[in-house]
Amino acid sequence: MTNLDPRSMIALAGFMSALMAIVLACMRRYYPPHIRGIGAWAAAPVFWLASTALFSSRGLVPDWMGLVGANTLLVLGTMTYYMGTRAFLGHRHTWRIWSGVLLVCLGVFTWLSYGWPNYEARLTFFTLVMSCIYGAQLRFLLRFGGSNFPVRLVEVVLVLHLATLFMRLISIFAGHTGANLMEPSIYQNLYIGAYALTVLMLSIGALLMATDRLRTELEHLATHDSLTPALNRRALLQRCEEEIQRARRYGNGPSLMMLDLDHFKAVNDSCGHQHGDAVLVHFVGRTLAELRTLDRMGRYGGEEFIVLLPGTDATAALTVAQRIHATLAVGHALDCKVSIGLTQWAGPEDTLDAMLARADAALYRAKALGRNQTVVG
């Protein structure tokens, strides 16, 4: 292990940084612009690459580049990755704070390289700074990152690297720092190897997080109405079929409501389609607020919607319908009246088509009786 050349290991880390920078840059170009943070994630490996290039060129470039510049770029890359994570999760950048930290780092690295040259002190300061940045990012992800696999992967990588940095501090205090970074030793090789692996895994974690976000958004687009928060027709009917199949196995079947906005064509004709769209969005929002988490609402077509109420009989479903009528009668500028046809599952022989037909017939009876009411069919 001690025979490994630190310069070669640093070059390997640089190669990994270059590779991941290319991958993330391509993602930034082809992913939707509203998925933020990918640009910063792509820039971070570039800074890491520049840092490793300067570290590897120690003795071939001036010390201010191989010492001060390399350390500062490594810190900058880690900060940039953190800023990308904040942007990706919808939080504002904190560059004003971290740019101040970066300037302090630049000053301290310069002082410990020229004013009071001290490799051990410089290494200790650098390790503490990196620990603070990784710790801040870990704390941020634990608070806001959620529990999906890509986020958990990044969290694990951060924890492991923080442990490595802690071990490095212990080795410094134990007097195992060596004369410089390029001196082959088991401690140097372990740290550089851990750094190379961290660079790779953090970039992979960023790639997985962005891909998971894109997959989630595509799934949402495939199952939801393009205007309202309701499900689209295909997804809604699929949920209805699944619930009827469940009812055939376990009993306690669902109720189905068909809702149609009263005089909606007149709203479009008199106020315009933009106002009509606003009415639809408002109506769906108010209706969803009256439903349970397990209930499903979907747009069946135009101004017609269906609500699926799993494990609900007609009596309980009628109570839900009355709440919907009540919430739409509060006098808001976008409030509207709605007619509802309601039916409940009739047993194992009942089908979705039959339920839809009964709900549709009940809806037409509600319209014929004067609208703005519920009829059970």
Image (cartoon, helix red, strand yellow):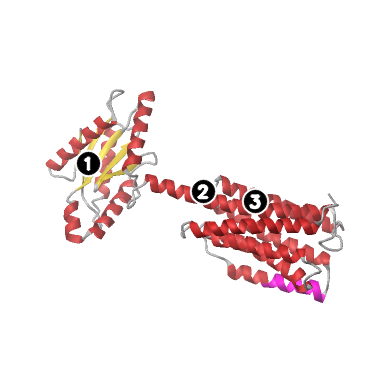
Locate residue 165, reporting x and y percent. 74, 55
Nearest to the observer: residue 44 or residue 346:
44
Residue located at (82% from left, 61% from top): 182
Residue located at (55% from left, 65% from top): 93
In the image, is 328 to the left or to the right of 162? left
Looking at the picture, which amino acid does disc 2 mark?
Answer: Asp
Quickly name the residue at label 2.
212
Looking at the picture, which amino acid does disc 1 mark?
Answer: Ile
Q: Earlier in the sequence, mark 1 or mark 3?
A: 3
Is 240 placed above or below 37 here? above
- Residue 38 found in image quarter: bottom right
Q: Name the disc covering residue 201, or none.
A: 3
Locate residue 204, reporting x and y percent. 61, 51
Nearest to the observer: residue 116 or residue 215:
215
Quickly name the residue at label 1.
340
Nearest to the observer: residue 5 or residue 161:
5
Looking at the picture, which amino acid does disc 3 mark?
Answer: Met
| Residue extending furthest toward the bottom | 115
Gap in angstroms between the C-alphas marked 1 and 2: 39 Å
Locate residue 9, reporting x and y percent. 76, 55
Gap in angstroms between the C-alphas marked 3 and 2: 16 Å
- Residue 108 is covered by the magenta coloring: yes
Q: Residues within 10 Å of mark 1 (few under 14, many from 20)?
A: many
Gap in angstroms between the C-alphas marked 1 and 3: 54 Å
Disc 1, disc 2: CB below 8 Å? no
Q: Over which residues does the magenta segment extend?
A: 103-115
Disc 1, disc 3: CB below 8 Å? no
- Badge 1 element: strand
